[in-house]
Image (cartoon, coloured by chain):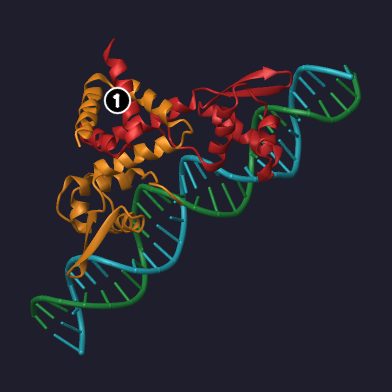
Chain colours: A red, B orange, C green, D cyan
DNA sequence: CGTGAACTCGACAACACGTAGTACTACATT
DNA sequence: AATGTAGTACTACGTGTTGTCGAGTTCACG
């Protein structure tokens, strides 16, 4: 095991819920937000626990329950996945170039801007 | 199933070999290039077959043997992985910005350049 | 303090991958 | 024709990850 490995289906759904809220949530609360799947409460707890073990979540006590919150923002996670993909190649610049070409117009603009701001430091 | 599934360890090694050569290779040839791992010939064949099934390789007959070659360049693959990661977020611009910030200096330069060239079209 | 909500543990099924054996087929050589 | 050789296809098994829970354990709160 190494790197930010991709999450499973349910794991991702749960991370999405946590990412969408800005307050730490209990297992029960998460469960309510995913009610359509009709999962056993323990299923949610287990996944929450695994995500914590993997470092995706942090938890703190709240009475007898745990409150979970993302360890990093979704954007940070996504950016990390992107960097990880980039590491897969021997020729990073070629991959970067390709990526730049694949990014759509408006998004290229965003990238350009972010890079420009970077420059003034 | 959707998207560019991540490859396993051996699968990636084999893709790397294929990507490194510009000519289609037979299973035996691939095996020779990965001799240090001392795999059974059938193991290489199996993986080659799975990669083909997954769409990473294309194969054509050559006598009684198959010749395998990458369906896409490594850079294209990496770029696609990056785009896929980007799709995981709701706020693409935030993720892009973060990514831009995370990219190291020289690489930021490459990105900038690629984006600039894009502009003149 | 007793009680039950919330937790921890362990399990099992399904699936992906690494790994490889066996059986079948086609060609060449004797 | 018989045999060896090389390549393929099919099947299989072990392990690790994820989805999914049930069974016990514990501890905060009434």
Residue A84 in sight = no
Residue A51 location in percent, x, y? Answer: 55, 31
| Side of B9 relative to B114 (left or right) | right
Give the residue at mark 1.
A112
Residue B112 location in percent, x, y? Answer: 23, 26
Residue A49 location in percent, x, y? Answer: 60, 30
Quadrant the C terminus of chain A occupies: top left
| Side of D5 relative to C17 (left or right) | left
Above or below: residue A85 compared with residue D7: above
Above or below: residue D3 compared with residue A102: below
Above or below: residue A13 compared with residue A115: below
Q: Residue at x 51, y 29 (%)?
A: A54
Residue B101 location in percent, x, y? Answer: 34, 20
- Badge 1, how many Cα within 10 Å: few under 14, some, many 20+? many
Quadrant the N terminus of chain A occupies: top left
In this view, the residue in front, B83 or C19, is B83
At mark 1, the secondary structure is helix
Q: Residue furthest front?
A: B121
In this view, the residue in front, A107 or B36, is A107
| Side of C23 relative to A50 (left or right) | left
Q: Chain of mark 1?
A: A
In this view, the residue in front, C2 or B97, is B97
The total number of labels drawn is 1
Residue A44 in sight = yes
Q: Residue at x 55, y 33 (%)?
A: A16
Which quadrant would residue C26 be assigned to in this image? bottom left
Above or below: residue B105 compared with residue B9: above
């Amino acid at each position: 095991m190494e790197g930010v490995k991709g999450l499973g289906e349910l794991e991702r759904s749960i991370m999405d819920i946590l990412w969408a809220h800005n307050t730490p949530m209990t297992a029960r609360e998460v469960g309510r937000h995913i009610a359509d799947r009709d999962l056993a409460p323990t299923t949610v707890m287990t996944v929450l626990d695994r995500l914590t073990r993997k470092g995706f979540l942090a938890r703190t006590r709240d009475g007898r329950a745990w409150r979970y919150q993302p360890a990093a923002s979704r954007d940070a996670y996504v950016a990390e996945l992107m960097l990880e993909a980039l590491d897969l190649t021997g020729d990073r610049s070629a991959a970067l170039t390709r990526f730049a070409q694949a990014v759509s117009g408006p998004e290229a603009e965003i990238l350009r801007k972010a890079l420009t701001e970077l420059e003034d430091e």
